Image: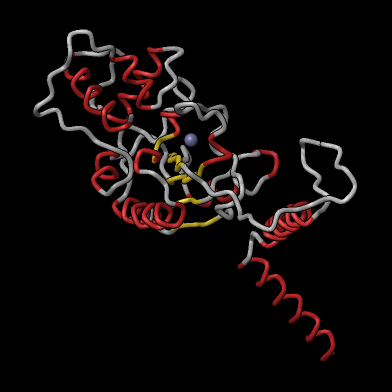
Amino acid sequence: MAKQIVITCIFLVLIAACAHKPYSSTNKQYKKQAKAFAKLLREYPLKDSVGLQYPDGWVGTTNFSMRRPNFVVIHHTAQNSCDETLKTFTLTRTQVSAHYVICRDGTVHHMLNDLLRAHHAGVSKWGNATDLNSMSIGIEIDNNGSEPFTDAQMNSLLLLLDRLKRAYNIPQANFIGHADVAPGRKVDPSRYFSWKTLAENGFGYWYDTTNVNVALNFNPVQALRIIGYNISKPEIAIESYKIHFVPQDTTKTINDADKKILWDLAKKYQ
Ligand SMILES: [Zn+2]
């Protein structure tokens, strides 16, 4: 009888432990995957995708470090809760992820080592960069896309950006949104997101058109290209520019005020 009670107790403790750690099995998967990459990094002679034939007597250099992220791409999750997003990012069939998720209460989940590649940007282009996933940190903010971001989220975001900027020496111009790098395909973070607040804190630039005189031959679409936008389809580049810099304007046309803004921004981003 005593034995049965002990077994029942152990069983209940195990159930309780599992209930408190719903991600223990996916965390194991993370470790397994990280271990496989570590093994790949330890291998020599080198085995990488280039597949060169090495002469006898392989020589490895002694001077190296890990590649570092050089951009930050900000998203909204378009989901209704952090729990929903954590679940999405731990289901292998979704194949999507981010380094960080910021919940409505300001909690920051760090889901992937900064030095590894998350799947958040997809097909993307900014300036000459075409594989943003390989060179950026992805930050997802828990927000359904049609509501304001919370103060707690913005505070957590600013602290996180400050750490990332210092740790990896990320240039001020390289803090951008998903809509910026995937115009026409993505609209996040939404018009509720304050890029002005970010710029005031040193992440991305904002404009001041007080003393701006636009040259007669000024080409606003070329200015969009200088800032970083993919202008192969100008109309959708303009849409992404408006979401970021003129959120109150839902048109897709460049007016005189935009020309002033773009003139000023092109000088800052060039
Ligand atoms: Zn996104």
Q: Quadrant of the N terminus?
A: bottom right
> Residue pushed farthest bottom?
2
x, y percentage for residue 184? 45, 20
> Residue pushed farthest left?
211
Count of numbered marks: 0
| Color theme of the render | secondary structure
Q: Residue at x 43, y 54 (%)?
A: 164
Q: Residue at x 70, y 39 (%)?
A: 93
Q: Nearer the viewer, residue 81 or 181?
A: 181
| In this rendering, position of residue 260 left or right of residue 52 | left
Regarding residue 84, the answer to whether it shows in the image is: no
> Residue pushed farthest top?
217
Q: Residue at x 54, y 28 (%)?
A: 130
259 in relation to 168, above or below: above
Q: Nearer the viewer, residue 225 or 45?
A: 45
x, y percentage for residue 192? 30, 36
| In this rendering, position of residue 88 left or right of residue 125 | right
x, y percentage for residue 85? 53, 46
Q: Quadrant of the C terminus?
A: top left
